[in-house]
Image (tube, grey):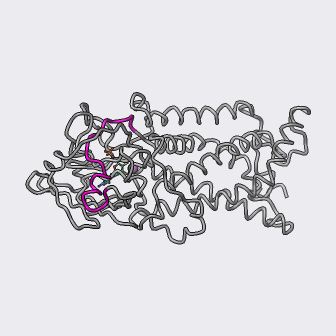
Amino acid sequence: MRDLPVLPTSPRFWRSPLRGTRLTSVLGLVLLVGVPVLFLTGLLSYAAYNPDLAPVNDTTPDKGLLGFYLFPWPTDPHWLYRLNQGVHVTLGVTLIPVLLAKLWSVVPRLFALPPVRSLVHGLERISLLLLVGGGLFVFATGVLNVQLDYLFPGSFYPLHFYGAWIFLAAFLTHAVLRVPVAVRNLRTLRKAGPQGRTDVLAAPEPDPPTVSRRGALWFVGGGSALLFATTVGRSFDSLRPTALLAPRGGPEPGGGPNGFQINKTAAAAGIKASETGADTWRLTVVGRTGTVRLSRAQLAEMPLHTAELPIACVEGWSTGDQRWRGVRLSDLAALVGYGGDGPPPDVTVESLQRRGAFRRGALRANQVADPRSLLALYVNGARLSPDHGYPARVIVPAAPGVLNTKWVARLNFERL
Ligand SMILES: Nc1nc2c(c(=O)[nH]1)N[C@H]1C(S)=C(S)[C@@H](COP(=O)(O)O)O[C@H]1N2
Ligand SMILES: [Mo]
């Protein structure tokens, strides 16, 4: 008997003296607070894309039922998406060590035999598989999207969206079953001191400790603090150099009026200088009364307005408010038959860019109507740089960066 290898299905295989209900309960309660915040900000971020407005925004198949909560994204406060997505990404990154430590703390239970003791036990185990798999999946897809510059073009939303719902269903099941246990554990443990023999998560034959449980918690907390400190700066211009874990947004923007984050350069988007010159570039505006074509000089003759608005990307990075100057979207709508009488319609914006998921975007009537929604020609007192969308780009308050289309060529006003 003694010589038989000990398998992971045996409790004796797992020897870390750190495992125990206390560690698991503390980590679990941290996630109990953090994961709902991630879920809520994630759902809001999805709503912010106006995914049910037009297929150019989102083609997530069969989101119908799960899209029950979608609503027209407001334009106030103007930093709404910046805050939402900053919290979503920064908190998500910060919780990674907690998630991994939590999974590590219960991993022996995944191997426990018999696999199913009763119907309830069987259901609980299935929910655990979905919980572990779903949790790892949403965290991994989120991190990859943030770090690797849209690794899944077009497919990130559905992957992250469905992953999140599966994760949430399993998370709620697990929380209902386990929170009372976790709370009871922490109460009785405080009274009774260290875990007794009845601790189902403690190793029956632990190795000698090399670090205390408290030390292990500090280690996890320290990891989270380090991730937080190297991530949070991506949401603040003055802290940007501290965002070591944030290769985004893209190339060095340099200084001057156009010296803020660049997501994708004109070169990367395949925009040639010959397409944006005064002789070649025209804005096409289509609406009820027909089609209007305008040069940049003609646009600059229209009434120009200023709006102080940030760029806030789904990846979590954002800029402070920039001073944009340009023509109101509602004024452009008025040019093609939507002036005065009632609210303007929705608009589909098309870029000069020929390829890529973000070459088009649809905005809702409430966004078109906002006086701060501009087709910007200038930023911070200077002409837009090619990388920030010259000759013209869309800027809308509170909207995700992806709807702030650069190198705009066409505006299609219609009820979508
Ligand atoms: N045509 C076009 N517009 C675009 C994009 C793009 O790839 N192509 N990227 C969008 C995304 S995802 C963001 S976050 C913002 C970034 O704007 P910035 O590069 O000026 O900071 O531009 C948006 N507009
Ligand atoms: Mo973005």
In the visual, does 52 lie left or right of 110?
left
Q: Is residue 92 above or below residue 136?
A: above
In the visual, does 393 lie left or right of 95?
left
Q: Position of residue 125 (x, y in %)?
A: 76, 62
In the visual, does 131 lie left or right of 49?
right
Q: Residue at x 70, y 55 (%)?
A: 171
Q: Residue at x 46, y 41 (%)?
A: 82
Which segment is the magenta one?
Answer: 319-339
Q: Residue at x 84, y 46 (%)?
A: 204
- The residue furthest front is 341
Q: Position of residue 130 (x, y in %)?
A: 67, 61
Residue 338 sits inside the magenta stretch: yes
Among the 4 quarters of the image, the one containing residue 218:
top right
Q: Position of residue 407 (x, y in %)?
A: 24, 53
Q: Is residue 361 above or below residue 82?
A: below
Q: Position of residue 332 (x, y in %)?
A: 27, 54
Q: Quadrant of the C terminus?
A: bottom left
